[in-house]
Image: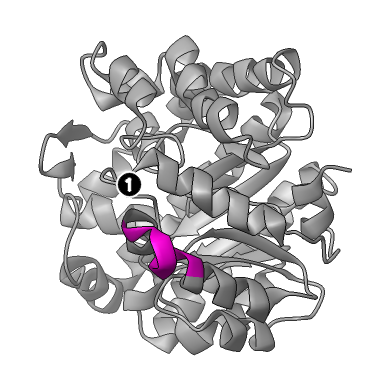
Amino acid sequence: MKRLLQTLNGEAVWPPPVWLMRQAGRYLPEYRAVRAGVKDFVALCTTPALAAEVTLQPIRRYRFDAAILFSDILMLPWALGHGLEFKEGEGPVLPKLRDEAGVGALDPARVSDRMAPIMETVRLVRTGLLAEGFGETTLIGFAGAPFTVACYMVEGGGSKDFAAVRGMAYAQPALFQRLMDVLTDATIEYLSAQVVAGAEALMLFDSWAGVLSPSLFRKHCIAPASRIVAAVRARHRGIPIIGFPRLAGVMTRDYAATGVQGVGVDTGSDIAAVAAMLPASMAVQGNLDPLAVVAGGTAMAGETAAIMHAMRGRPFIFNLGHGIVPQTPPDHVAALLEQVRAG
């Protein structure tokens, strides 16, 4: 069994498997070369040959234990018919979804056709990993969790506090629940399709889970994640799922009941304290600060050593606590991997 899959199966593999969130991206010159030839980010995500190429680039360079599909969590609302564009220096921009008409316009029937190029990317990556000699590399598929996707749809993009989406959850609970149900059902279909196409593990990114109160966290993070995990695993027995309830703090203990096999830990959390909340057989993933990798040297080495020491003896996947940033020197990533692989 592949090392990352062993870990998600509850084994304390050492040295731990390692991959980095956003490992395919703007810190790599080979990625920038591909991106320069594409009109926009959505086009890159929906051109299978190019999306597969950038998925494979960090595996060729670093031989990570996992490749993660190159795409974006907002491709799901795009597939549902919601507007989406990525503006330079601004990030994702979407129409603000605030009423019944907006929710009613979402069309689950179109998701399969619009996501077809992404499924082709999964197939190309799975084939490419074997053809290029990376047979021990696990292919991870992913989706944004319904609440985090709803954040961008309601706000119309990013936000410091996601006040509009929180306000909608309180003031218009029936409408917000309807949106969550549409997104949850679509996420189940999207993740299932990735498994059929060749994904060997899945990750559910709930990047803004931590902005919610405990009661709303249970309702809009734990409940949909539980539905998604149960439905996907009913269709694909044994498929492991990693949940990433970013900024969840002590609520991570409750999140473990969703049925995921691994939990990602964000940079701001004490990974040992989070691990102590979770079953001993559950894999923990994280949580090096991406800025420590930018700094490199003794700062990166010291933070890495502390995480490794804290996690020795339990199922653990070394990763960052958030995505790698564009200014990261590629040679710092190589030094990080050398240290982790030395144990």
Q: Residue furthest front?
A: 298
In the rendered image, the vertical position of residue 317 relative to residue 163, given as above or below: above
Question: Magenta part of the protein: which range?
Answer: 295-301
Q: Quadrant of the C terminus?
A: bottom right
Percent coordinates x, y for residue 76 in the rendering: 41, 38
Left/right of residue 232 with respect to residue 124 in the rendered view: right
**Residue 57 magenta:** no
Asked whether 47 or 221 is in front, the reply is: 47
Percent coordinates x, y for residue 208 in the rendering: 35, 66
In the rendered image, the vertical position of residue 33 relative to residue 103, given as above or below: above
Residue displayed at 47% across by 66% down: 288
The rendered magenta stretch, by its main secondary structure, is classed as: helix
The color scheme shown is one colour
In the rendered image, the vertical position of residue 85 relative to residue 248, given as above or below: above
Left/right of residue 17 with respect to residue 274 in the rendered view: right
Left/right of residue 8 with respect to residue 98 in the rendered view: right
Find numbered disc 1 in the image and state the secondary structure of the residue it sits on. loop
In the rendered image, the vertical position of residue 218 relative to residue 234, given as above or below: below
Q: Which residue is labeled 1 in the image?
A: 328
Left/right of residue 238 with respect to residue 65 in the rendered view: right
Residue displayed at 58% across by 72% down: 305
Amino acid on which the number 1 mark rests in the picture: Thr
Residue displayed at 51% across by 89% down: 250
**Residue 298 magenta:** yes
Percent coordinates x, y for residue 304 in the rendering: 53, 68
Asked whether 57 or 160 is in front, the reply is: 57
State the image quarter where residue 61 is shown.
top right
